[in-house]
């Protein structure tokens, strides 16, 4: 259920909550459609039926999930370069690379900590609270807690909401000089090609090879250049 908002229909058992949701639904229609006043009044009457209102909220949940996936860009980070599981799951079984970023840069310091939960967070559609609205982008099942994940959340500058997020241009986020600190290659990765890219004169970046402790001997025999490394 990662990055998929779900609205809490159980709240509709409360009369006050039903009223708030109906007001929200009507306001959305007024703002985004050309419905006439009689049509809006008819909609209000129909939504007084709890079953109709619940069905409407479930339909809006699916539509909102699609909108979130289309609108927001999510970049995932973790603080432990030595995590064997992270290298196995996200770096092509130790054949990929890890990018080390400067946490004091204006971009990376805005990373938000992921919240690991036993149950998916329920939100209300009418909420204007920014943290509650962004919570579905930061919530993850507790089974993934070992990742200790942080996330950068961005929107494209040409089609943004009022939420305070990073802004991309054409789907790309420009990083300031010094944000990328180093490139760490998995112990089975193509170090030669990465080393050449890191040697750019315009943006020099340090380079090293990672090694997992339980595969130290095997790695050393296979690559002749395995070493312990934690970029700082």
Image (tube, rainbow, N blue to C red):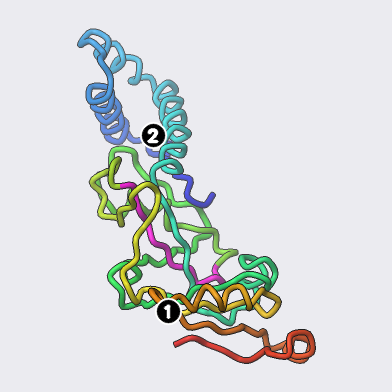
226 shown above or below 155: below
Q: Residue at x 41, y 42 (%)?
A: 68
Crowd rating for badge 2 (residues with CA inside 10 Å; few <14, some 14–19, many 20+): few
Q: Residue at x 68, y 80 (%)?
A: 187
Q: Farthest residue toward the left?
A: 37
Picture disc at residue 13: 2
Work out whether residue 9 or residue 214 is closer to the camera in this orientation and state it. Answer: 214
Q: Is residue 94 left or right of residue 163?
A: right
Q: CA distance from mark 2 to mark 1?
A: 60 Å
Crowd rating for badge 1 (residues with CA inside 10 Å; few <14, some 14–19, many 20+): some
Q: Is residue 148 magenta?
A: yes
| Comparing labels 2 and 1, the label whose residue is closer to the camera | 1
The x, y position of residue 168, in whole percent, is 34, 52
Q: Secondary structure at mark 1?
A: loop
The x, y position of residue 64, in whole percent, is 41, 36
Work out whether residue 177 or residue 201 is closer to the camera in this orientation and state it. Answer: 201
Residue placed under numbered mark 1 in the picture? 204
89 shown above or below 69: below
- Tell me which corner region of the image, top left, top right, bottom left or bottom right, holds residue 103: bottom left
Q: Earlier in the sequence, mark 2 or mark 1?
A: 2
Q: Is residue 194 left or right of residue 173?
A: right
Residues rendered magenta in the picture = 145-156
Work out whether residue 19 or residue 200 is closer to the camera in this orientation and state it. Answer: 200
The x, y position of residue 207, in whole percent, is 53, 82
- Tell me which corner region of the image, top left, top right, bottom left or bottom right, holds residue 110: bottom left
Q: Residue at x 54, y 49 (%)?
A: 1
In the rendered view of the protein, which quadrant contains the C terminus?
A: bottom left
């Amino acid at each position: 259920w990662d990055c998929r908002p779900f609205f809490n229909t159980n709240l509709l058992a409360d009369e006050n909550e039903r009223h708030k949701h109906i007001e929200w639904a009507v306001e959305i229609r007024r703002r985004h459609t050309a419905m006439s006043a009689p049509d809006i009044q008819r909609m209000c009457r129909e939504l007084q039926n709890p079953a109709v209102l619940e069905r409407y909220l479930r339909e809006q949940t699916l539509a909102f999930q699609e909108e979130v996936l289309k609108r927001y860009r999510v970049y995932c980070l973790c603080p432990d370069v030595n995590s064997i599981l992270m290298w196995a799951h996200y770096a092509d079984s130790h054949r990929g690379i890890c990018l080390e970023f400067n946490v004091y840069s204006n971009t990376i310091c805005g990373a938000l900590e992921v919240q690991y939960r036993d149950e998916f967070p329920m939100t209300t559609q009418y909420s204007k609270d920014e943290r509650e609205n962004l919570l579905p982008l930061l919530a993850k099942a507790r089974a993934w807690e070992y990742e200790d994940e942080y996330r950068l959340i961005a929107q494209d500058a040409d089609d943004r909401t009022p939420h305070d997020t990073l802004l991309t241009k054409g789907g790309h986020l420009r990083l300031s000089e010094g944000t990328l600190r180093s490139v760490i290659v998995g112990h089975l990765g193509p170090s030669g090609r990465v080393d050449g890219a890191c040697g750019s004169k315009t943006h020099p970046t340090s380079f090293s090879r990672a090694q997992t402790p339980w595969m130290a001997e095997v790695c050393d025999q296979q690559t002749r250049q395995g070493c312990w490394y934690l970029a700082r």
